[in-house]
């Protein structure tokens, strides 16, 4: 097992619905530490960098529009195998497919919306975590 860090974003739908505390509660209950926390409205430039691998895909513009539509909570979490652990805690990307007991299964919405309102983002690999943390928390890089 490896101590690692991951970026977690509570997306505008989660923030707007007052679910940031519940998401953070679940992260801490799992045993992960919060080592960075910020509330902000992301810039399009920041989102372009974050979602660079999706540029040109049909969902890219609606996703950037959605993510820049309001406040998000950005967090850096730390713990043993926290990347995989948080992704399991978050559940499947599509809230309809996410198991009960997961963040997306319990709290996410998928009602034929232009962009899935799935509450959270979590880094998918150590490389992504390093890159994403550098975008959202440059002071924590390294």
Image (cartoon, helix red, strand yellow):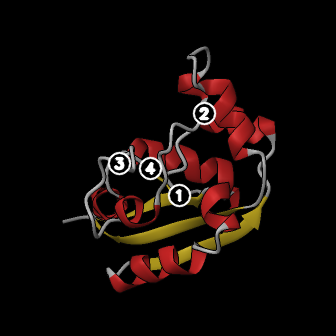
Callout 3 environment at 10 Å: few (<14), some (14 to 19), or many (20+)?
some
Disc 4: which residue: 123
Disc 1: which residue: 119
Mark 1 touching mark 2, by CB under 8 A? no
Name the residue located 58 percent from the left edge and 67 percent from the top edge. Answer: 75
Among numbered discs 3 and 1, the one appearing first in the sequence: 3
Disc 2: which residue: 114
Point out residue 92 in the picture as x, y percentages from the top left corner: 32, 49
Distance from Cα at disc 4 to Cα at disc 3: 21 Å
Q: Quadrant of residue 58?
A: top right
Point out residue 141 in the picture as x, y percentages from the top left corner: 59, 57
Among numbered discs 4 and 2, the one appearing first in the sequence: 2
Callout 1 environment at 10 Å: few (<14), some (14 to 19), or many (20+)?
many
Tag count: 4
Q: Quadrant of residue 105?
A: bottom left
Distance from Cα at disc 4 to Cα at disc 2: 23 Å
Distance from Cα at disc 1 to Cα at disc 2: 15 Å
Left or right placement of residue 5 versus residue 54 in this view: left
Callout 2 environment at 10 Å: few (<14), some (14 to 19), or many (20+)?
few
Q: Nearer the viewer, mark 4 or mark 1?
A: 1
Name the residue located 42 percent from the left edge and 71 percent from the top edge. Answer: 78
């Amino acid at each position: 097992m490896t101590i690692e860090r991951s970026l977690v974003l509570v997306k505008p739908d989660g923030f707007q619905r007052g679910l940031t505390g519940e998401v953070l509660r679940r992260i801490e209950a799992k045993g992960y530490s919060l080592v960075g926390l910020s509330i902000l409205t992301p810039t399009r430039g920041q989102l372009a960098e974050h979602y660079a691998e999706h540029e040109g895909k049909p969902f890219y513009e609606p996703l950037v529009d959605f993510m820049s539509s309001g406040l998000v909570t950005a967090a850096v979490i730390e713990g043993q195998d926290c990347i995989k652990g948080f992704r399991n805690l978050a559940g499947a990307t599509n809230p309809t497919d996410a198991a009960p007991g997961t963040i997306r299964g319990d709290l996410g919405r998928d009602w034929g919306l232009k962009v899935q309102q799935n509450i959270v983002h979590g880094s998918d690999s150590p490389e992504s975590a390093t890159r994403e943390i550098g975008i959202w928390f440059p002071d924590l890089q390294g």
